[in-house]
Image: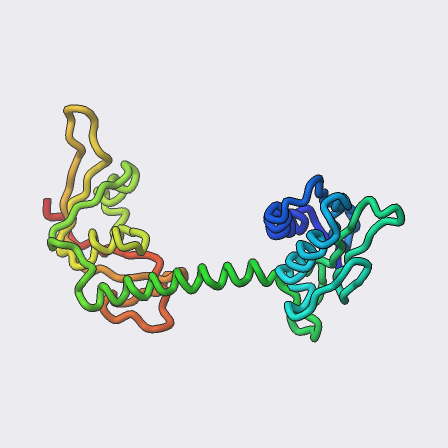
Amino acid sequence: MRELTDKDFALVNETVMPIVERYALEDTEPGLYNPFLFALTVPAKNGEGKTIKCANEIFHTLGVLPKDRAIAMAEAGDYCAIFTDEGGETYTLLFNHPVAMAFKSGDEEYEFTIKGRNEIEEAEAEAEETEMRSLVEGIKVGRLKSKTPDGYLVLAGEFYDAIEAGKKTVEYRNFTEYNIKRTIGLKTVRFNRGYGSKGKPPKQMQWEVKGVVLMDGDENECDPYNVPEDFWPVTIALQLGKRIG
């Protein structure tokens, strides 16, 4: 095992403390800055039953105790324990936080994860992919596109100037529904240099759009109407042709 770092302790706090707060354990303290272990000290006035329930939820969430098992006061699992001091004034919830395990992914015992956090991250990733696929399908069937082939976009001064000087030939936008509706299907695009000032309209220019492609995080490109299953669009790229105004 390796010693826990401050970052490791911060990570475990993010997972553990909301559970502690939900159980309203009074005066609970993270303690025992042991380089390999994490501990919570709970005043006995909170009650043994509540403390045990809270402890087991923490252990299950962290993945240091199987969800089909619970431990009682003065009992230990392989990587967690609940015990009380001799005077019975405090309880201590002790566990080897999974981040502290220096196992490599090929080791047999590399099975410890923050399960609650992983489940949340997996759900978020699944929702993100579902939304992305919905946008891709919207483009494919013609539901999501610009209402007109002649669009306009507002640019910061440095980007406007680079395009005007011919140094920038592609304009990028994040792959969102808003940007899809302003880019997909364009034949020309008018650029505004900022929003102008009171009584003074912004500088403008118009360009031909040679094509619009989607790009993934590795800058691979694909046709927006023919996106492969394993392609994850993150950027819309407008490829500019000649200036027409």
- Return the x and y of residue 186 as percentages of the image width and height: 15, 56
Which quadrant of the structure image shows residue 105?
Answer: bottom right
Instruction: State the scheme by which the image is colored.
Output: rainbow
Of 128 and 64, nearer the camera is: 64
Q: Quadrant of the N terminus?
A: bottom right
Q: x and y percent of residue 99 in the render?
A: 67, 58
What residue is shown at x 17% (from left), y 34% (from top)?
A: 203
Residue reaching furthest right?
Answer: 86
Q: Say if 190 sits above or below 140 in the image.
A: above
- Residue occupying the point 69% across, 65% down: 65
Q: Looking at the rendering, which quadrant does residue 113 occupy? A: bottom right
Q: Nearer the viewer, residue 28 or 199?
A: 28
Total number of numbered discs in the rendering: 0
Q: Is 82 rendered above or below residue 105?
A: above
Q: Give the residue drawn at x 44%, y 62%.
A: 125
Q: Is residue 57 left or right of residue 129?
A: right
Residue 129 placement, left or right of 151: right
Q: Residue furthest top?
A: 199
Residue 104 visible in the shown view: no
Residue 182: x percent and y percent? 20, 51
Is residue 68 among the parts visible in the rendering? yes
Residue at x 55%, y 62% (from the top left corner): 118
Percent coordinates x, y for residue 173 in the rendering: 29, 51
Up the image or down, 90 lies above or below 113; here it is above
Q: Name the quarter where the C terminus is drawn.
A: top left
